[in-house]
Each structure stands twice: as C-alpha cells, then as structure tokens.
C-alpha cells in the first residue's frame, strides 16, 4: 500500500523510543545512583538520534516511516516522522538533556546512601517523559497516541509533588483530575472514529473520513479532551500551581514540552485526520479561546507576586498563540504556509525560552530563599547570568526582534493581514504589550539596588544551562532556510471536501 513501507533511516524511529524505555527499565532494575548516570548518559545519545532523524528527513525531502513488525496498517502500526515531528524530537531531546544536567545537584543521591526516594523517582520519571514524548511525536495511530498521552500524564504528575508538601500534592491531584477527564473525552472520540471507519491509522483516516454526525461528535470530544490537557483557556486552572510548585527542572520540562504534546495531537487531528471536514466555525472557536488565553493569562501574570507563578501564568498566555494558526492555516479552504511555520516557530521558541526561564527562576529562589518579585532587588548584580537568562527569555515571549518569538508572531501577523482577519492582529499586538509588562515586573526590581544577599551562590554550570536555552530561543530568529524547508516536509496543502 502506498505510504506504508519502512524507509531508509526508519530504524532510527524505533531507536528514539527504545532508548529511553531501555534506560527506564535499567533504572528500575539497577536503582540507586545508577538511575542518575543512566539518564545522564542516554539523554545526549537521544539528541544524536533526533538529529539523525531530522537530517534524514531533510535529506530525503519526505517523511521517514518505520513499519513495526513488518505489518502495515490497518493490521499493524506505523511510526512516522515528518518535518514537524523531527523538529519536536530534537527539541525534546535537547531540553530533556539540559534538564537532566541542570538537576544533578538537586537530585543527587546523598553520599553514603545506596538510594534516596526523590532522586530515584526523578531520574526514572524523566526517562519516562522522554519515552512518552517521543511516542507522541512519532505515532501514526490515534489509540497509540492515547496510550502515549497516558504514559506522559503518569510520568509528569508525580514530578509536581516530589517534595511531598501539601500544596504540591493538591496541585498534582488537580493536574491528574483534569488530565483524566481529558483522557476520557479523547478515548470516547477515538471509539466513535473506530466504530465508523474500522481503523485508527491517521493516513488511512485522512482518505476515508467524511462529514457525518459520528465524525463531528468524535472531533468535539477529542478536541475538548486535548484542550484540557493543553490547559487552554478556560481549562487552565491546573497549570499554574502545578508548574509553579514543581522543582525547577521539572517545571522547565512541563512547560516547554509536556503541554505541547496534546497540542501536537490537535494539529494531527485537524490537519491530518479531519482535513475534509468543514471546520471554519471550529477553527474560529479555537482561535477565540487562544485569544482569551493570551489576554487573560497575561493579565493574571501581571498580578502575581511570585516569580515562578508569573512565569507559569505566562505559559497560559503563550499557549494561546499556538491556536491562532488554526483559522489562519485552515480557514476558508486556503492553505497559509506563513501561519503553519509561525505556529511551529511559536511552539519551539516558547519551549526553549520557558525552559530557561523556569530554570533561572529556580536558581533565584534557591539562592535568595524565596521568589517574591518585590524582593528581587539587586539580583542582577548578584546573579547577572541568571537575570540575563530571564531577560533573553522575556524578549522572545514579548516577540521582540531578533528572537524566535518575534519570527513566530511576525509570521502569524502576516498571515492574519493577508487573510483579512484583523482581530487576531489586535490580539497578537495586545499580547506583546502585556508580555512586556510582566517581563518588566521581573527585570525592574532585579536590575535596581545594591547586590542582593544570597544564601548560597548558584553553580555557574547551572546558570549557563538556563542561559543557553534562552539563547536558543533568541537564535531561532536567525534560522536558515533549510530549517523552514524541514518544517514544510510532509505538510501538504489542505484540500476541502
């Protein structure tokens, strides 16, 4: 069957999944200090595998496919990496690796002890997150994507409450509740799709799905479930306490990567499974919710008194930009490559900026003994690299040149203007101004006053990791043409019914 044959480099896809799974299994079996070293060894190898996949996709100009067990869908399972998948795999591997090396000092097994609960749990869960994310970005089957999302949830939730404090337990349970409700809705939609067409393979469904009541019901259920997991307005209540109370390395991964997985599935659902479905109303609704997220999340960020909570509410706002790509790329039956690339660029720039900012916020809180924004005076003189990381990350969130955030928002602005959808232009500009306000709230006190008194000086290596991640968000604004060519691979113009 066309499109279902293992291609050159296809074995790399299975390696991308098996590597963290093998690490997780070995960590559980060997335990103790070995879990840390397994994670620190395998994460950089994951970067090399992801880079090889991206190189292969770019060189071939077509998606890389691996047929598991040699049985093509619908009997078997196909793994597939197009340009978007390849970029997300590389982003995931890079941020997971950075988080692992950043977390070494905070989750090292104490000397003289064979094993400690929090370090062992963290190092095994981070590998579970790595595996689940790779499955999400590679799977071509709606049910396997459900399984991957559940693995992701059950690896992410415990990271929120590793310290065992009551407030972190409450935040983790709230996160779990929203995630489980989202799973139920998604699975109900999957059942309807399977009952109607007898397959859950994305490529097969793209050719078979047609407008009918079962499809509309499935689309609504699956979208609602994924929105709950993405924390799009008004379903964002679980995100700020979960991200703000998790350890810094965990917050970085949760904000940068975990909330992007259900968004990635929404893209697969509407762009790949349901391209023939008349969807102007649904696309406008998604963008309206995204606009509300931008405005409400930014206003709530402005009102926060704690640094990590401000950054967490900023995630609520920045997620909203991702949903503007739906009406711009799919609306009116005309395909907009600017909107598509802008949405992908926003996904990447936010991931790197927010990962670095959460790490920097964690360093500031650890060194000062608090993260109260009004008491950050003199932090810039005491910890210049940390504050520089916060500033560079904030630059991308505001969408100022030459950052990746600017490139993303400029492409979305261009697509909005070309489509005559000026309401999204107003929202993007307003969101940028509000982002400038909450970034200013961080930098104004941090850059004023005498050097702050630190309880302990942060390790330069940890500051360097946070800064490096935010610099990647900045450098995305200088991405070469080959990068944009990679994004376009496997993304065909949407054809109406």
Image (tube, grey):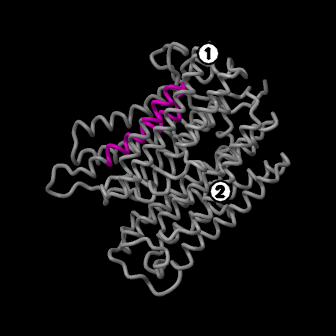
- Residue found 55% across the figure and 58% down from its top: 353
Image coords of residue 173 (percent x, y)? 39, 47
Q: Which disc is residue 162 wearing?
A: none
Residue 168 horizontal side relative to residue 220, left or right: left
Highlighted magenta segment, given as a residue range: 122-150
Mark 1 neighbour class, 10 Å CA radius: few under 14, some 14 to 19, many 20 or more:
few
* 187 vs 130: above or below: above
* Residue hosting label 2: 294
- Residue sitting at 45 percent across and 16 percent down? 69
Q: Position of residue 166 (x, y in %)?
A: 33, 57
Residue ID for mark 1: 197
Front residue (pair 475, 210): 210
387, 47: nearer the viewer: 387
Picture quarter with the N terminus: top right
Is 54 rendered above or below residue 404? above
Element on which disc 1 rests: helix
Q: Tell me which label, 1 or 2, sits earlier in the chain.
A: 1
The image quadrant of residue 459 is bottom left
């Amino acid at each position: 069957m066309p499109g279902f044959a293992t291609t050159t480099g296809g074995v790399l896809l299975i390696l991308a999944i098996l590597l963290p799974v093998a690490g997780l299994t070995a960590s559980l079996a060997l335990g103790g200090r070995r879990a840390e070293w397994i994670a620190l060894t395998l994460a950089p190898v994951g970067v090399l595998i992801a880079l090889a996949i991206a190189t292969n996709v770019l060189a071939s100009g077509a998606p890389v496919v691996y047929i598991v067990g040699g049985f093509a869908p619908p009997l078997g399972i196909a793994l597939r990496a197009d340009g978007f998948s390849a970029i997300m795999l590389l982003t995931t591997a890079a941020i997971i690796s950075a988080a692992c090396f950043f977390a070494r000092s905070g989750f090292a097994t104490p000397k003289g002890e064979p094993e400690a609960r929090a370090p062992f749990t963290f190092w095994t869960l981070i590998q579970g997150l790595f595996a689940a994310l790779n499955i999400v970005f590679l799977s071509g089957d709606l049910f396997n994507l459900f399984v991957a999302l559940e693995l992701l949830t059950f690896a992410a939730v415990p990271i929120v409450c590793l310290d065992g404090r009551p407030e972190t337990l409450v935040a983790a349970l709230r996160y779990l509740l929203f995630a489980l409700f989202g799973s139920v809705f998604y699975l109900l939609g999957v059942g309807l799709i399977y009952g109607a067409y007898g397959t859950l393979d994305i490529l097969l469904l793209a050719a078979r799905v047609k407008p009918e009541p079962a499809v509309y019901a499935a689309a609504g259920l699956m979208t609602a479930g994924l929105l709950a997991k993405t924390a799009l307005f008004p379903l964002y209540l679980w995100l700020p306490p979960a991200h703000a109370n998790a350890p810094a390395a965990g917050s970085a991964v949760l904000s940068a990567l975990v909330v992007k997985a259900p968004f990635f599935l929404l893209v697969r659902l509407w762009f790949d499974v349901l391209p023939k479905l008349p969807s102007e109303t649904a696309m406008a609704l998604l963008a309206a919710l995204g606009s509300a997220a931008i405005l409400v999340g930014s206003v709530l960020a402005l009102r926060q008194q704690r640094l990590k909570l401000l950054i967490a509410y900023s995630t609520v706002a920045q997620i909203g930009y991702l949903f503007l790509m739906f009406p711009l790329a799919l609306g009116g039956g005309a395909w907009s490559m600017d909107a598509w690339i802008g949405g992908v660029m926003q996904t990447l720039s936010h991931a790197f900026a927010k990962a670095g900012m959460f790490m920097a916020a964690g360093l500031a809180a650890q060194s000062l003994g608090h993260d109260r924004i009004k008491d950050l005076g003199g932090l810039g003189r005491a910890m210049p690299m940390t504050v520089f990381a916060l500033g560079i990350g904030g630059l991308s969130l505001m969408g100022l040149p030459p950052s990746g955030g600017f490139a993303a928002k400029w492409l979305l602005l261009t697509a909005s203007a070309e489509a005559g959808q000026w309401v999204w232009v107003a929202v993007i500009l307003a969101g940028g101004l509000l982002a400038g306000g909450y970034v200013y709230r961080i930098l104004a006190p941090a850059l004023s006053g005498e050097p702050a008194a630190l309880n302990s000086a942060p390790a330069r290596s940890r500051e360097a990791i946070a800064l490096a991640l935010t610099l990647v968000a900045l450098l995305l604004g200088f991405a070469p043409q080959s990068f944009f060519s990679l994004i376009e691979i496997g993304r065909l113009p949407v054809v109406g019914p």
